Image: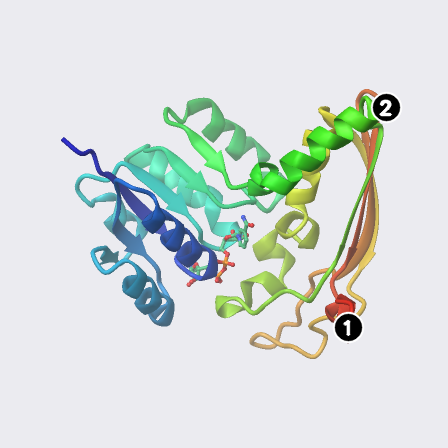
């Protein structure tokens, strides 16, 4: 007898659709239900998962028969409230996109969720599973005998457009250094094998999104900065971020 794992997907924009394509590559899987409030995105998701039922809310999705696990790929500020709703109704194993929450005032709610949720929850910090990162860590460890200082530099293009422009605002994303850079802080912890004890940072919105306006409100996400993180056993790491570096690629002759 073949066992099929049935997925329910909450939020199916760019990342949800990438997950749909990846789930389709896994044998023994089926996407049974999708909740995606934007009509255009829902149509794209349905094209990728024609067998899935399109649902009108998280509650509607949770009522789908036979669900085995859930994936949350909604905007960041929805993650915690949606995990809490799932906990109240049907606590299935969840893969939730990063970041888990956006406001430090929500820490106690997250801790309560962590302490009571009866099924596995996996946060999509997938950089740590990328083969080049694993190879780099192995080589660097062997070459140095233990890394004490680490610099991560990202020079890249500005944030892409997202449904409703949610990624233009600190209150929806948690801020650039949460939305974008949580992957890098996770890699610092992994590389140094330690936990941070002190953070120093400086950043600004120097260039990006300054001519944009969402119902009269201007974007406030930072586009550059330096962050220094001290770790408990004396290691330290630095992040350099520049998000107005579109032309960073070397020209080919
Ligand atoms: N792991 C990674 O490397 C990675 C990369 C990109 C994005 N992400 C994360 O994935 C999530 C989605 O980002 P995205 O780039 O797909 O954005 P997106 O705007 O393309 O998609 C988000 C979707 O959620 C829908 N949505 C809005 N409100 C909702 C609600 N209440 N419930 C369910 N869906 C709702 C929107 O209509 C939209 O289609 C974010 O948390 C983002 O941080 C992770």
Badge 2 element: loop
Residue 2 placed where, x, y %? 18, 34
Above or below for 81 versus 12? above
Q: Which residue is mark 2?
A: 234
Label 2: few (<14), some or many (≥20) within 10 Å? few
The residue lying toward the viewer, choosing from 80 and 51, is 51
Q: Which mark is residue 172?
A: none
In this rendering, the answer to whether 209 lies above or below 242 is below
The residue singled out by tag 1 in the image is: 251
Q: For the C terminus, give its image quadrant.
A: bottom right
Count neighbours of disc 1 (C-alpha within 10 A) and say few if under 14, some if 14 to 19, many if 20 or more: few
The Cα atoms of the two marked residues, 2 and 1, are separated by 40 Å
Q: Which residue is most to the left? A: 1
Q: Position of residue 177 (x, y in %)?
A: 70, 50
**Residue depicted at 27% across the width and 36% down the height:** 68
**139 with respect to 128 (left or right):** right
Q: Secondary structure at mark 1?
A: loop
Q: Quadrant of residue 81?
A: top left
Name which residue lies at 62% across and 77% down. Answer: 213
Instruction: Give the residue at x 65% y 48%.
Output: 178
Side of 96 where 9 appears, left or right: left
Q: Residue furthest front?
A: 253
Position of the N terminus, as image quadrant, is top left
Residue 100 position in % (x across, y down)? 53, 41
Query: Residue 32: x, y in percent?
Result: 23, 49
**In-front residue for pair 67/17:** 17
């Amino acid at each position: 007898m073949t066992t099929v794992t049935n997925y329910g997907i909450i939020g199916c924009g760019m990342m949800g659709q990438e997950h749909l394509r990846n789930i389709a590559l896994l044998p023994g899987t089926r996407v049974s239900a999708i909740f995606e409030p934007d009509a255009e995105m829902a149509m794209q998701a349905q094209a990728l998962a024609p067998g899935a039922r399109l649902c009108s809310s998280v509650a509607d999705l949770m009522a789908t028969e036979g669900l085995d696990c859930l994936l949350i790929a909604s905007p960041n500020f929805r993650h915690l409230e949606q995990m809490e709703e799932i906990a109240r109704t049907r606590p299935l194993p969840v893969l939730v996109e990063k970041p888990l929450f956006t406001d430090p005032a929500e820490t106690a709610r997250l801790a309560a969720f962590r302490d009571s949720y009866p099924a596995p929850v996996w946060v999509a910090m997938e950089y740590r599973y990328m083969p080049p990162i694993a190879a780099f860590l192995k080589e660097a460890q062997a070459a140095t005998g233990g890394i004490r200082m680490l610099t991560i530099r990202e020079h890249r293009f500005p944030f892409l457009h997202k449904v409703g422009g949610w990624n233009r605002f600190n209150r929806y994303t948690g801020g650039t250094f949460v939305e974008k850079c949580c992957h890098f802080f996770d890699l610092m912890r992994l590389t140094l094998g330690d936990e941070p004890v002190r953070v120093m940072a400086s950043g600004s919105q120097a260039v990006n999104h300054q001519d944009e306006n969402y119902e009269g409100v201007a974007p406030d996400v930072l586009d550059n900065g330096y962050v220094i993180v001290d770790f408990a056993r004396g290691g330290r790491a630095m992040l350099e971020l520049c998000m107005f570096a579109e032309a960073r690629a070397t020209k080919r002759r």
